Amino acid sequence: MIFDFDGTLCDTHEAILHCTERAFAAHGEAVPERAANEAAMRAGGAMGHSVLRLAPHLAAEPERIAAIVATYRAIYDEGEGLALTRLFPGAAAMLDTLAARGFAFAIVSNKGESSVHASLEHFGLTGRFAPVIGDRAGFARKPAPDAFHAAIVPHFAVSGIGRLVMVGDAAPDLGFARAIGAEAVWAEYGFGDRAACEALAPDLRIAALADLPAALAHLPAARDAQPRL
């Protein structure tokens, strides 16, 4: 089972908005209006895409976009982001229940990888997910399937992958699920744009993270699935 991070495992809504505003201000750019900032977050892309969407006049200045992204991540990782992050209720119990049914867990996120690791450690979830793949050099971001083929398939090459499920709240997550042939579970409680997610026809929907085991209960356990490798 592959999870997205922002809006799926953790409520980072205020963290993202706050750190984006701080990064823009630090570079002398107009602080985005909250509605525009919210819309950029709902699109579910990488931070560089959000910066460009919020400041299209920077299209010819990729180095400035990169600098704003770097500042955003520094502010986030220095603690301002984590202070505003909340784990969605029922996460640990959900993982225990699905692990007992044979699932192993990975994370594929368009978020900076150091921020994902810091949050997992903070919430006592380190070691529950392997591999953990964030926005890193050499990997195309979701919905491209690169992370799956380059990092997840090799990780499970010995045991094989049976049933494959992708859980996410935004269109890039559901597109990623389609690209790798996974069941697409839409976390409706998250941040994703509803119309964009509806258009991708998710296989299952959950109204809360804690609902995931019940949503999957009528389907065969992971241990009973035939390997995909």
Image: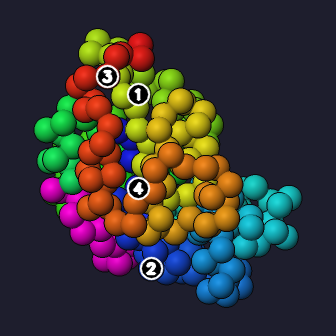
User: x and y percent of residue 214 in the render?
Assistant: 27, 53
Q: Nearer the viewer, mark 2 or mark 3?
A: 3
Q: Quadrant of the N terminus?
A: top left
Q: Residue at x 34, y 72 (%)?
A: 85
Q: CA distance from mark 1 to mark 2?
A: 30 Å
Q: Amino acid at mark 3?
A: Ala
Q: Which residue is mark 4?
A: 5
Reading the image, the residue beneath label 3 is: 225
Specify which label sits upstream in the sequence, 3 or 4: 4
Q: Is residue 30 left or right of residue 93?
A: right
Q: Which mark is residue 152?
A: 1
Q: Which residue is depicted at the point 41% across and 13% down?
A: 229
Residue 122 in view of the camera: no
The picture places residue 80, in percent across and down from the top left corner, at 37, 76
Q: Position of residue 106 (x, y in %)?
A: 34, 39
Prevailing secondary structure of the magenta residues: helix
Which residue type carries mark 4?
Phe
Left or right of residue 183: residue 227? left
Residue identifier under label 2: 14
The residue lying toward the viewer, choosing from 104 and 123, is 104
How busy is the neighbourhood of tag 1: few (under 14 within 10 Å), some, or many (20 plus)?
A: many
Q: Secondary structure at mark 2?
A: helix
Q: Nearer the viewer, residue 175 or 211?
A: 211
